Amino acid sequence: MRRLRLGMMAGGGLDPDAVAFLTAAGITDATISAAINTLVIQLKSFGIWTKLKAIYPFVGGTATTHKFNLKNPADTNAAFRLLFSGGWTHSANGAQPNSVNGFANTFLNADTALVNASNHLSFYSRTSTVGVTVEIGCSNGGNNFFHLRSAANFVSGAISLVNFTSTVNAQGFWLGSKENSALRKAFKNGILEGTSLSINSTPYENLNIFIGARNDNGSAAFFSNKECAFSSIGDGLTTTEATNYYTAVQAFQTTLNRQVP
């Protein structure tokens, strides 16, 4: 029945990629279906869809539905579906790690899946509190980082830091983008928060990116307490693309009635 219903919806205008995700996650809710469909269509119209390798929309309210990658919703490591570990709270608003031992393995390897000169990380936080946490990323445990800290900084490469420490509210859609080997930008809600022009082409570590913490040489560290309503990994985005990305993601959250300022 579920496949028939989604098939009928697809005939009425649902994007095939939206249908594939909804089917894999077992989601038939009309509001969620419409939100996912609009999100996919907007990302494609903005030219962003092809730049995304993993998209985690965190819909459906359970660990089972939250694990799927919208870009490739197969239930496999190779498709970058999430594996949740430690303490998490799953709800219609997203997924929240417990700040003690909760993290999710994306199985997306920073060294093999990403290009050093063009990459991004994003994280939609519904939690306002700040702290010494990492929302998404990996590190060799030394000076080579690839991570995003809401209300703190975005790092892409060895000592290639974009700071925005004046921010005191972690709520919102955070995006760190590396457009080329010498240009990094950090955005909150589509607005530029900081820029770094430091040149760096150091290869990323052979490590999977974690959400809810940072993968430090295979061990989770800097555990987050941020409720995540969306996250993504992919190629670098321009300022215009970052603004458009926020527009699409915020419209998605608003449809689900879980948007934050």
Image: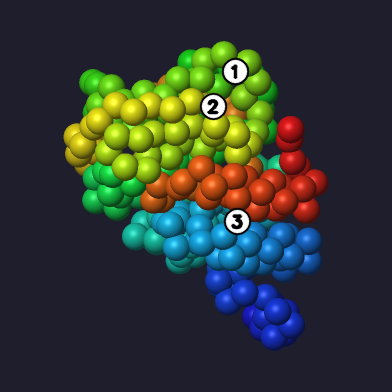
Total number of numbered discs in the rendering: 3
Disc 2 and disc 1 in contact, CB within 8 angstroms = yes
Three-letter amino acid code at the position of disc 3: Thr
Q: Which residue is mark 3?
A: 65
Earlier along the polypeptide chain: callout 3 or callout 1? Answer: 3
The residue shown at (41%, 50%) is 234
Q: In the displayed structure, does residue 241 sit left or right of residue 210? A: right
Instruction: Looking at the picture, tell me which residue is in the foreground, 213 or 154.
Output: 154
Residue under pointer 2: 193
Element class at badge 3: helix
Q: Residue drawn at (70%, 53%), measured in percent from left and top?
A: 252
Q: What is the quadrant of residue 222 in the picture?
A: top left
* One can see residue 231 in this view: no
Q: For the residues marked 2 and 1, what is the alpha-carbon distance in whole angstroms?
A: 9 Å
Residue 253 against residue 75 in the figure, above or below: above
Which of the two discs, 2 and 3, sits closer to the camera? 2
For mark 1, what is the residue? Answer: 167
Q: Amino acid at mark 1?
A: Thr
At 45% across and 56% down in the image, what residue appears?
A: 52
Mark 2 lies on a secondary structure that is strand
Q: Position of residue 153 (x, y in %)?
A: 46, 23
